[in-house]
Image: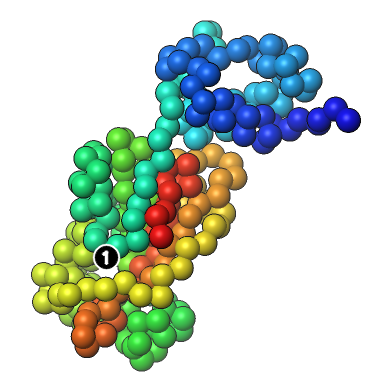
Amino acid sequence: MKKKWTWESIVDVLIREFQECKYKKGEKMPSENKMAVRFGVTRSEIRKAYERLKELGYVYSMQGYGSFFSGKREKIRLSMTDQSFSKKMSALNLHFETKNIGCQKLRDDSLIHSMLDVDFSEPVYKITRLRVLDGEPAAIHISYMAEDLFPCIRDDGASVTSVYDYIHNCGYVNLHSENTQITVSSLSKRERALLEIKGYAPSLVLTCRCVTLPSRTVVEVARTIYRSDRFIFEI
């Protein structure tokens, strides 16, 4: 029985061909007409596939000239260690920057308070940072921290780019991550906007608690949203 192609399955085939080096960097991609004939689909289906490849960074277009292969994209391997994101990126010699995009007091979230081991009446602040790799948004880091442990967090939060360093500077050392969970999740509208992703795209979500040893004081609950086309986790 003849296979029925969709734009999603065409994307999978082309990504596999990119990984197998069947295209050279900068090489012009076949026209929508040629691809439509190859897969037996309409041009609109090929157009959707090319748009998705553009979102993932595999293909770029030049008006009037067509689409071109950007070059093979290697996924970044992240180890599950207690090192900060910044140190992991530096160790891999990757150019990155961090943008603080907001600090706000958390509103009525009993789950976060429970994970932080603090009373529901205790003020908790949410610090959000955007990680940018080689000029492209790659991850969103969200930290929840109790004001009781960080009295200046309300004033400092909007300028913090490394929560790991901030925790150390506040006197909490010998940090350890626990209750780590990795899930695959769809992105919200705001998350897609921050990561500059159009349409549906799955993401890798890492959630954990950061505690001090040996006291096991919970200093942070962290939720990090990674672009699934940029990262692989080594457990």
Quadrant the N terminus occupies = top right
Q: According to the image, label 1 marks what residue?
A: 82
The picture quadrant where one finds residue 100 is: bottom left
Which of these two is toward me, 127 or 21? 21
Amino acid type indicated by mark 1: Asp
Name above or below for residue 58 compared with residue 186.
above
**What residue do we see at 46% from left, 84% from top?**
110
Q: Position of residue 155 (x, y in %)?
A: 18, 69
Which one is in front, 180 or 136?
Answer: 180
Residue 140 appears in the picture as rendered: no
Q: Going by the picture, which residue comes out furthest to the top? A: 65
- Does 153 sit left or right of 13 as displayed? left
Residue at the limit of the structure toward the right, as seen here? 1
Residue 62, compared with residue 219, is above or below; it is above
Residue at the image point whose x is 24% and y is 61% from the top:
83
Give above or below for 192 relative to 208.
above
Say above or below: 109 vs 141.
below
Between 107 and 212, the residue placed more toward the observer is 212
Find residue 118 and report its horizontal and vertical position in percent.
Answer: 34, 88
Identity of the residue drawn at 14% across and 70% down: 168
Quadrant for residue 49, please give it: top right
Crowdedness of circle 1 by 10 Å Cα count: few (<14), some, many (20+)?
some
Q: Is residue 48 left or right of residue 186?
A: right
Label 1 secondary element: loop
In what quadrant of the picture does the C terminus appear? bottom left
Decide if residue 43 is on the left or right side of residue 19: right
Q: Is residue 49 visible?
A: yes
- Residue 15 in the image: state x and y as whole percent: 55, 30
Q: Which residue is found at the position 45% from the left and 15% from the top?
A: 24
Residue 156, image x, y percentages: 18, 67
